[in-house]
Amino acid sequence: EDVVDPAVLPDERDVENSLRPRQLDEFVGQPKVREQLSLVLESAMRRNRPPDHILLSGPPGLGKTSLAMIVAAELGAPIRVTSGPAIERAGDLAALLTSLGEGEVLFVDEIHRIARPAEELLYMAMEDFRVDVVVGKGPGATAIPLDLAPFTLIGATTRAGLLTGPLRDRFGFTAHMDFYDPDELEQVLRRSADLLGVQLRGDGGAEIASRSRGTPRIANRLLRRVRDYAEVRADGVVTTAVAAAALAVYDVDELGLDRLDRAVLDALVRRFGGGPVGVGTLAVAVGEEVETVEEVAEPFLVRAGLLARTPRGRVATPAAWTHLGAVPPPGGGG
Ligand code: ADP
């Protein structure tokens, strides 16, 4: 099975895979998560047991899939990759689970979107390494219990709060991934530039890092667009000026806001007078799912100090008005 990630275009998947860090010490940033995870892995290896199930939460593109692959690599175990929406029936999941070998890692991306019957099957699988396979239909149906080889489940979710309590409780270790700071993104970019054979000079990397929305996936994507520009319009070398000119061509503003971020801010400020407005109304205004607005756009807008979540709804900060070239209302907006 394949990872289905709406944030990744199919032709980008190969490049993305080639840029993935392979070992924990190649993984940039998230020092707390790395330390905790290395303890979990080290102690499991000493006990010669598969580690506890691991939940990775955080916005898209922060390295959850990469970290899952690193865990498997560090354990020297094979990894099976799937996603919540890909598991439609409990039977599909049962088949997958019974095919896992001892100590294998099962990575389930977007685990909060798993169908309810499959989720219930997962409870027992995670806790007791057992599944009940139902054979037949109606009154004659029988549940046949099957033992599973001990495995490690790694779940990824854009927000741990979206998981049901019983599922969340079955993870022995939960790591929350946070946005990266510009220095860390610059490190990611230097590594990727080496792998792609791109020459970064001066503050070329810093220029890209500052517009990458705190997200390694975006940093790598922008690096490739800047490389294109550098090859076609300059001598192939990415200087600060080349990076700035290239990013202007691709409409990446100085805060790195993307189309969705800008649409959300624009609706908030221009249509709803800066708020407060409910997230449902805001989502309709930009033609997106509530989930997408809440999990993809809002975390960064909040972190960038452009949007506030209040009990009465979403509010644009004065900085948001200024960023859009609008004049904040007297009294601070909202
Ligand atoms: P997620 O699963 O959270 O959406 P991924 O693991 O797919 O994110 O990461 C997206 C890309 O960003 C990867 O291809 C990888 O190259 C890069 N990346 C993410 N985190 C890091 C990191 N900590 N260090 C280096 N590269 C990273």
Image (cartoon, rainbow, N blue to C red):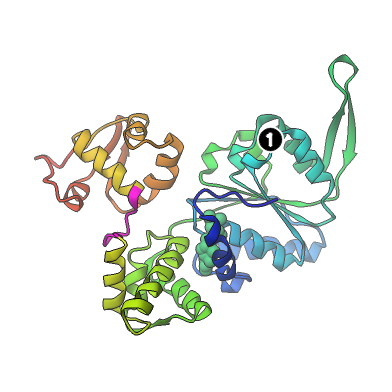
The verdict on label 1 being within 8 Å of ligand 1 is: no
Residue 254 within the magenta-colored segment of the rendering: yes
Q: Amino acid at mark 1?
A: Glu
Does 137 appear above or below 57? above
- Residue 161 location, x and y as percent? 52, 39
Residue 177 within the magenta-colored segment of the rendering: no
- Residue 244 location, x and y as percent? 27, 71
Residue of label 1? 88
- Outermost residue on the front side: it is 232
- Residue 157 location, x and y as percent? 56, 46
Does 279 appear above or below 254? above
The quarter of the displayed image where residue 114 is located = top right
Does 257 appear above or below 297? below
The quarter of the displayed image where residue 10 is located = bottom right
Does 241 appear above or below 35? below
Q: Is residue 63 visible?
A: no
- Which quadrant does the C terminus fall into? top left
